[in-house]
Image: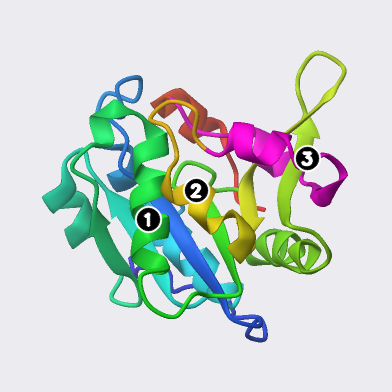
């Protein structure tokens, strides 16, 4: 069976980089989650292709656990950054990725996408990117399962947040940095952002949109 190609590309966006987080331990999954296949692609390839289809460039994938194997699965359209501190928590991968992307010419915004949200489409990502143009950052908003609303990735940040993200704490990640923004964090309703993959059963339950 031929390997599916990337989704159809949308028009390029104005200088938006993408950071794909694929460095976790995958302890609940039981094997390297970025290498799991869904809809004919590995999760890491799917994330890169979706970000590319949304118009993002450059794209950097942060790897850590099983770094060599995951890096080999990254499409040629993306770069790879190795986080040697990946076991200390996702915040270290976010810091490593932001440092890599902003080491030279800083992009006017950066989309942050974990590898375990495969139901998100290029149009979903584009909505978050567009919302960041009128705020300091934008994030997905979704049902928290208790009758309220939560926010989380995909997230799109602007340069004023780069220094804080480069100094992310190991476990804190971006959440505390985004929470203090208040109304300056644009929230984009995206139900699919609630469906992150922790186990093989989670992945099997998802269908393409």
Residue 24 highlighted magenta (yes or no): no
**Mark 3 and mark 1 in contact (Cβ < 8 Å)?**
no
* Inter-mark Cα distance, 1 to 3: 23 Å
Image coords of residue 69 (percent x, y): 15, 50
**Mark 2 and mark 1 in contact (Cβ < 8 Å)?**
no
Q: Which residues are magenta?
A: 174-198
Which of the 4 quarters of the picture holds residue 123? bottom right
Write down the residue under mark 1: 97
Task: Check disc 1 and report its element: helix, strand or loop.
Answer: helix
Classify 10 Å Cα crowding around label 1: few (below 14), some (14-19), many (20 and above). many
Write down the residue under mark 3: 141
Q: Which mark is residue 165?
A: 2
Image coords of residue 29 (percent x, y): 34, 25
Q: Which mark is residue 203?
A: none
* Inter-mark Cα distance, 1 to 2: 9 Å
Which of the 4 quarters of the picture holds residue 60? bottom left
Image coords of residue 205 (percent x, y): 55, 31
């Amino acid at each position: 069976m031929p390997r599916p190609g990337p989704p159809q590309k949308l028009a390029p966006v104005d200088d938006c980089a993408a950071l794909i987080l694929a460095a976790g331990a995958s302890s609940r999954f039981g094997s390297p989650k970025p290498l799991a296949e869904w809809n004919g692609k590995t999760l890491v390839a799917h994330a890169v292709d979706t970000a590319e289809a949304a118009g993002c460039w450059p794209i950097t994938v942060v790897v850590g656990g099983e770094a060599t194997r995951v890096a080999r699965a990254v499409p040629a359209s993306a770069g790879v950054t190795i986080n040697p501190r990946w076991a200390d928590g996702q915040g270290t991968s976010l810091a490593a990725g932001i440092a890599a992307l902003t080491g030279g010419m800083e992009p006017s915004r950066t989309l942050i996408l974990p590898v375990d949200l495969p139901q998100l489409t290029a149009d979903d990502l584009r909505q978050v990117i567009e919302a960041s143009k009128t705020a300091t950052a934008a994030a997905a908003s979704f049902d928290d399962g208790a009758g309220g609303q939560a926010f989380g990735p995909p997230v799109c940040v602007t340069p004023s947040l780069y220094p804080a993200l480069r100094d992310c704490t190991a476990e804190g990640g971006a959440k505390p940095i985004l929470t203090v923004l208040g109304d300056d964090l644009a929230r984009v309703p995206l139900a699919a952002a609630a469906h992150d993959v922790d186990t093989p059963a989670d992945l099997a339950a998802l269908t393409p949109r």
